Image (spheres, rainbow, N blue to C red):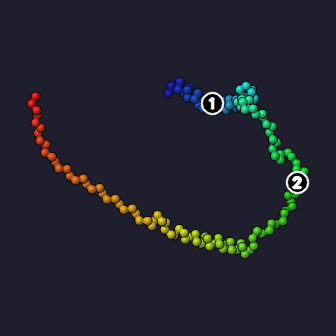
Amino acid sequence: MSPVRQIRGTKIATAAWLRPLLTASVLASLLGGCSSVPDAINPAAWYRGVFGGERRAEAPPSGAGQSSGQAYPNLSSVPARPRDASTQQERAALGQGLVADRANAQYADDQPSPAATRPAAPTPRPAAAPPPVAPQAVAPQAVAPP
């Protein structure tokens, strides 16, 4: 290899790690410039000027920093256990129904599907050969005298 190639190879290797670093720093500095845009070049200000909308005051977030006047709940107190929604007999009947559903579902795969029971389509017959063409005798044509 020639020395020029080695120098170029070194420059390319240096640029390989330097280029992303420079790109990130330039983008970070440009992003900071977007925080203050004059109204003359701000598209949002143009829109408000054309359609006449004023900037609405942002509503404070709900519940943030506001006290409802109630005491904070005591986490050591545990509420009473909720009443059962169903009786023991209803739960047993429901469980038996689920077991029966599972038992019946085991046999669903043994039944053949409708596609498997259909007969295959018949194979098409080969096309009939065209009838042979009889050779015609070619008669010499008479040439008209000039």
Helix, strand, or loop for circle 1?
helix
Please tell me whether residue 98 is drawn above or below residue 23 in the rendered image: below
Image coords of residue 44 (percent x, y)? 72, 32
Helix, strand, or loop for circle 2?
loop
Image coords of residue 101 (percent x, y)? 61, 70
Relative depth, front residue between 137 and 23 = 137
* Residue at point 31%, 59% (across, down): 125
* Residue at point 59%, 72% (across, down): 103
Taking 127 as reference, is 92 left or right?
right
Give the class, few, some or many, for how many residues have Cα within 10 Å of label 1's Cα (few <14, many ≥20): few
Provide the residue designation for mark 2.
72
Image coords of residue 99 (percent x, y)? 63, 72
Taking 121 as reference, is 85 left or right?
right
Q: Earlier in the sequence, mark 2 or mark 1?
A: 1
Q: Is residue 44 visible?
A: no
The alpha-carbon separation of the residues under discs 2 and 1 comes to: 55 Å
Amino acid at circle 2: Tyr
Taking 101 as reference, is 115 left or right?
left
Q: Is residue 134 visible?
A: yes
Amino acid at circle 1: Arg
Provide the residue designation for mark 1.
19
Q: Residue furthest top?
A: 4
